[in-house]
Amino acid sequence: MRLLENCKATDIFTGGVEEYNKAIFDGFKDKGYTLVESAITILLSREEKVNCYSKIISYHEENLLKHPYIGTC
């Protein structure tokens, strides 16, 4: 978002993958959480285009310092 806001980029193609890891998935399952493999790709752009599905009106960055599923507040 900073690159787009500061006009350092016009479009950013990004994505992420949550791949299967038996030890991690089993550990979360033992705590009552069911995880699944997933993947996503998205194109972020400074301009609203014809095939636009949504608009980011605000964002916030923060380091949680722990995993949200297993950390305590």
Image (spheres, grey):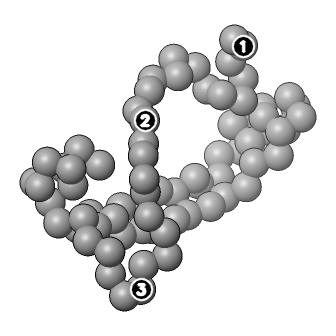
Residue 47: x and y, percent? 26, 71
How far separated are the C-alphas under marks 3 and 1?
Answer: 41 Å
Q: Amino acid at mark 2?
A: His
Name the residue nearer the viewer: 23 or 33: 33
Q: How far from the left and from the top, in percent, is residue 63?
A: 45, 23
Kind of residue at disc 1: Thr
Residue at 10%, 54% in the rendered image? 8
Amino acid of disc 3: Asn
Q: Residue at x 66, y 28 (%)?
A: 68
* Residue 13 appears in view: no
- Mark closer to the chain start, 3 or 1: 3
Circle 3 SS class: loop
Mark 2 neighbour class, 10 Å CA radius: few under 14, some 14 to 19, many 20 or more: few
Which residue is most to the top?
A: 73
Residue denoted by label 1: 72
Residue ID for mark 3: 51
